[in-house]
Image: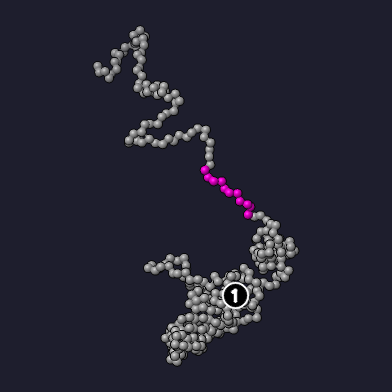
Amino acid sequence: MSTFQRASRPEGAAPARSSERPAERPARPESNRALKRAAYAASNPGGSRPAPAATDRHPAAPSQAKPRNRPRTVDRDPKPVTAAENTGERLSKRVMALKGCSRSEAEQYIEGGWVMVNGVVVEDPPFRVLNQTVTIHPDATLLNTADVTLILNKPPGWLDGVEDEDEDDEDAPPARGRGKKPQIPNARSLLTVANRYSNDQSEIRALKRHFLQLEAEVALETGASGLVVFTQDWRTTRKRSEDLGSMEHEMIVDVAGEVQPEHLQKIARALNDERNPLPQVKFSVNSSSPEASKLRFAIKGSHPGLVAYLCGKAGLEIQAMRRIRLGRMALTDLPVGQWRFLSPYEKF
């Protein structure tokens, strides 16, 4: 019988008696695993299991065990403590108490530049005050809230400030093979208190609201300088729109070289060409020299590019162009890049 087979009793035999059974079953030898556990327990009374030994193929990993009873720390910096932003009361509320008026009237006094906080004019009704001294000008009135008109001497190379719906989008990507167009400054950015003409005779106090909702409809070439008008007054806008075709624009043009009679004849032929009707234009020579000359053009209506077209027909090279008059409004001695208020007695 093979040693891997268990002996079997004969078929039909009764179970073995106790006397036939062995008195004690022989003890099983302890396995190697149990011996290792006993040896490990004797050498490590604390009960912590050591990390496996490092080998070349399996380097020792950093211990992940956390020390017990370790106080918790916070690494992030605490948020700074800031003062409350909504302290104090609105300036309009203080003006209501001082003037005994409604909130809307108090805001009009503030926006009109009649209210000072510690001696400084403040034009913002939401401005908050605590213990500051708030004073109202003794001549404060709500009647002087008329819209204003600004006269600007635009520098050459600046946009005229006229809103153009067809103007290229600045955020649009450049066309293939072309770089982004250089940014051209806009004349509207010159309308600040710092650029106001020091000899302004209007006696109007410049306020923040005077630079809001300004419209400009009379175009001027980017390369030209001269008179540009911005207004808040709808009556001025309507008047200019109605008379735009008949309002006279006076231009002074600097050209290279001396203007000869044949140059003037070519300009006249271009204006009288029946195949290409042009607006009514009056022109003359202001000064002439071998180095440079000045031409004067008076054009009915706004026609940007017309002067350049006529000078090109005559073979004249334009060096500078300036608009000095618009209707009855003259540029006079207003410096380039500065502006002034339109006085009440001035008309276009």
The spot of residue 122 in percent (x, y) is 65, 64
Q: Which residue is mark 1?
A: 197
The spot of residue 79 in percent (x, y) is 57, 48
Q: Residue at x 38, y 67 (%)?
A: 176
- Residue 125 placement, left or right of 53: right
Q: Residue at x 58, y 75 (%)?
A: 339
49 part of magenta stretch: no
Q: Tell me if residue 12 comes above or below residue 123 in the rendering.
A: above
Q: Residue at x 74, y 62 (%)?
A: 98
Residue type (three-letter) at the residue carrying disc 1: Tyr
Instruction: Identify the image quadrant of residue 116.
Output: bottom right
Name the quarter where the C terminus is drawn: bottom right
Instruction: Identify the image quadrant of residue 178.
Output: bottom left
The spot of residue 166 in percent (x, y) is 48, 72
Q: Tell me if residue 183 comes above or below residue 75 in the rendering.
A: below
Query: Which of the two residues, 120 or 266, is positioned nearer the viewer here?
Result: 120
The spot of residue 100 in percent (x, y) is 75, 63
Q: How is the image coloured?
A: one colour
Helix, strand or loop for the magenta stretch, by majority: loop
Q: Residue at x 35, y 13 (%)?
A: 25
Q: Tell me if residue 284 comes above or below residue 24 in the rendering.
A: below
Is residue 180 visible to us here? yes
Name the quarter where the N terminus is drawn: top left
What span is in magenta? Answer: 75-85
Instruction: Identify the image quadrant of residue 135.
Output: bottom right
Q: Tell me if residue 62 comes above or below residue 257 in the rendering.
A: above
Count all numbered tags in the image, as a single digit: 1
Counting other residues with Cα less than 10 Å from the Cα at mark 1, is it few (<14), some (14-19), or many (20 or more)?
Answer: some
- Residue 256 placement, left or right of 123: left
Secondary structure, mark 1, is: loop
